[in-house]
Image (cartoon, rainbow, N blue to C red):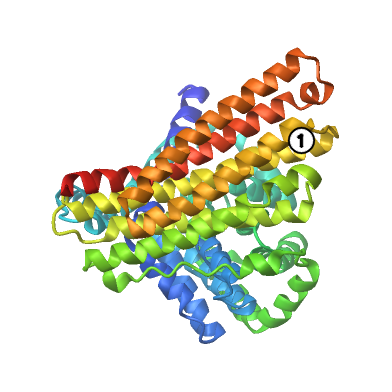
């Protein structure tokens, strides 16, 4: 077979493996995210208990990285201590290894059974949770199919003349194999998928145990790197958590890598063949990691606190109250919608904290204030996701009834608030940084215009929150009138700015792009905030 065709088949099979792994994780998150969050958020009763919870959630999500991100969020909000968070991640690492154990056992009858059951649940399920669980079962079946495809695609490689030399080199140089595995795992963002790929190649006789062990160690480090990189812009607490887990993994991996380099680790004790030896080595690594590191979570917490210092202003960001959506109310739509409105109000207050200091940033571009605003954006993004998921899980009596429609309207406003947060960080903050870097100043008239527009937007945010909570028609009409007035003010500012350009005002020329982009951003934010008025007007018009 043509080598390029072989590689194409392998690439397609690996892509299916990655997609199926993601399919399982997203299906579980969509159907059971609130339950998983409650387990992790309320389980702080000892390191052993949290390790067990971490292992269980990782097995359900088939991802230790997903557990790390959930735990980092709880740690950042103060609901999970650093030492207990580290215990959770150690358990999640073990849970991920147990997932590989389960998926590596592939009886012939299991794959078609999973596809049949999962497909029936997804196509015939009467509610969203059943359909998403069907998606999970289907995903596991597709993982098994992808492993079969990888095995079939790699059969021709056993006769490739260059393969023995490559395998011999990597087996004799475990450090290089370790680095390649860590890099590839980080690239595909899935240690489960990579280890399963290595095991499948071992089944075909392409990877001996010595090479597979180095690759497994690299995959574990790559998995720790994924979580650390994903939290690098988060709070100091979140970064401490993922850094501590990475340090634990790295210390044990380096010790075992040294043993591979200096001596021979007897794989015969781990199983009858290379594939089973690699799977069991992966499990043994994570069991040893849990046993050795679990008593050291407190010292590691102190070490990471010393390595990662909290910047000024982060303590305030951590005081943002966590989302408190009551799952007990999802069977009572009026109460559940009221709970969602309270969280929308909290979310909007965080957006207000992001928006208010913008003009100060245009003057000074204080790095600490910019960092705090970016941290607040993470809280807004998380709130939007939780509110939207909560609203989708409410059991409405009629799918097209007024309560279901109101739920959709609240979900849309949550999305709009997230867009406002994005506009603040990705547009206004960047423009403030650009002005500081270029060391340019606005003209006096331009500066007054921008301050006036900013004031209008903040006031309209307050008015939008009143409309959200009161659902008053007069307030909604006033909000839309203010939207129109804001549009007129924005167009007038742009026209005045262009007039100053024609007159050759140097300050206006230097800040032209920043001025016009700021006006556009303010108008966009104002329109997003005013959207809360339309459902109120429709509702009151129908009642009238």
In the rendered structure, the answer to whether residue 375 lies left or right of residue 445 reads: left
10 Å crowding of disc 1: few (<14), some (14-19), many (20+): some
Quadrant in the picture for residue 161: top right
Q: Quadrant of residue 254?
A: bottom right
Would you name the residue on which mark 1 appears? 434
Question: Horizontal and vertical percent for residue 206?
Answer: 54, 44
For the point 45% across and 33% down, the residue is: 484
Q: Quadrant of the N terminus?
A: top left
Check the image and report above or below for 389 versus 499: below
Q: Is residue 304 visible?
A: yes
Q: Position of residue 505 (x, y in %)?
A: 81, 20
Pinpoint residue 523: horizontal percent, then vertical percent: 54, 35
330 or 73, which lies in front? 330
Q: Is residue 241 left or right of residue 2?
A: right
Q: Going by the image, does 478 lie left or right of 285?
A: left
Q: Residue furthest top?
A: 502
Nearest the viewer among 348 and 134 is 348
Relative height, residue 507 to residue 194 (above, below): above
Q: Is residue 360 above or below residue 527?
A: below
Residue at far right of view: 439
User: What is the x, y in percent for residue 271?
Assistant: 49, 66
Identify the secondary structure beneath mark 1.
Answer: helix
Give the total number of marks visible in the rendering: 1
In-image side of 85 versus 168 (left or right): left
Residue 105 visible in the shown view: no
Residue at the (52%, 77%) spot, across then down: 51
> Vertical placement of 350 versus 481: above or below?
below
């Amino acid at each position: 077979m043509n080598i390029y065709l072989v590689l194409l088949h392998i690439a397609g099979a690996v892509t299916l493996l990655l997609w199926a792994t993601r399919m399982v994780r997203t299906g579980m998150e969509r159907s059971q995210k609130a339950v998983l969050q409650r387990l992790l958020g309320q389980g702080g009763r000892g390191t052993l208990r949290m390790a067990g919870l971490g292992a269980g959630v990782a097995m359900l999500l088939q991802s230790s990285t997903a557990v790390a991100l959930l735990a980092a969020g709880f740690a950042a909000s103060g609901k999970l201590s650093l030492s207990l968070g580290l215990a959770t991640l150690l358990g999640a690492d073990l849970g991920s290894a147990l997932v590989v154990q389960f998926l590596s056992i592939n009886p012939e009858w299991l794959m078609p059974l999973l596809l049949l059951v999962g497909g029936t649940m997804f196509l015939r399920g009467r509610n969203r949770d059943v359909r998403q669980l069907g998606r999970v079962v289907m995903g596991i079946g597709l993982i098994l199919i992808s492993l079969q495809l990888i095995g079939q695609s790699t059969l021709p490689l056993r006769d490739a003349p260059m393969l023995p030399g490559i395998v011999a080199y990597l087996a004799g140089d475990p450090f290089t194999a370790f680095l390649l595995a860590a890099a590839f795992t980080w690239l595909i963002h899935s240690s489960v998928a990579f280890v399963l790929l290595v095991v499948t190649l071992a089944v075909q006789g392409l990877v001996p145990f010595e090479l597979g062990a180095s690759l497994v160690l690299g995959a574990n480090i790559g998995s720790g790197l994924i979580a650390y990189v994903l939290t690098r812009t988060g709070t100091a607490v979140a970064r401490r958590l993922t850094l501590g887990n990475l340090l634990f993994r790295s210390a044990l991996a380096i010790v075992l890598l040294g043993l591979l380099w200096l001596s021979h680790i007897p794989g015969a004790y781990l199983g009858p063949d290379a594939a089973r030896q690699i799977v069991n080595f992966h499990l043994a690594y994570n069991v040893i990691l849990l046993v050795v590191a679990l008593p050291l979570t407190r010292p590691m917490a102190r070490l990471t606190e010393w390595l990662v210092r909290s910047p000024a202003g982060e303590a305030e960001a951590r005081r943002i109250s966590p989302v408190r959506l009551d799952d007990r109310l999802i069977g009572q739509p009026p109460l559940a919608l009221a709970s969602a409105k309270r969280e929308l109000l909290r979310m909007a207050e965080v957006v207000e904290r992001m928006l208010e200091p913008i003009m100060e940033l245009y003057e000074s571009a204080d790095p600490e204030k910019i960092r705090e605003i970016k941290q607040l954006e993470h809280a807004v993004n998380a709130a939007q996701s939780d509110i939207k998921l909560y609203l989708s899980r409410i059991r409405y009596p009629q799918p097209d009834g007024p309560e279901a429609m109101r739920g959709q309207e609240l979900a849309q406003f949550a999305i709009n608030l997230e867009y406002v947060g994005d506009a603040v960080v990705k547009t206004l903050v960047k423009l403030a940084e650009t002005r500081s870097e270029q060391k340019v100043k606005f003209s006096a008239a331009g500066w007054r215009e921008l301050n006036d527009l900013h004031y209008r937007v903040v006031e309209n945010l307050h008015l939008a929150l009143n409309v959200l909570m009161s659902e008053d028609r007069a307030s909604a009409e006033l909000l839309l009138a203010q939207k129109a007035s804001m549009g007129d003010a924005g167009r007038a500012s742009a026209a005045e700015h262009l007039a100053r350009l024609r007159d050759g005002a140097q300050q206006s020329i230097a800040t032209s792009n920043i001025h016009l982009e700021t006006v556009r951003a303010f108008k966009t934010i104002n329109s997003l905030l005013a959207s809360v008025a339309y459902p109120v007007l429709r509702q009151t018009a129908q009642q009238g």
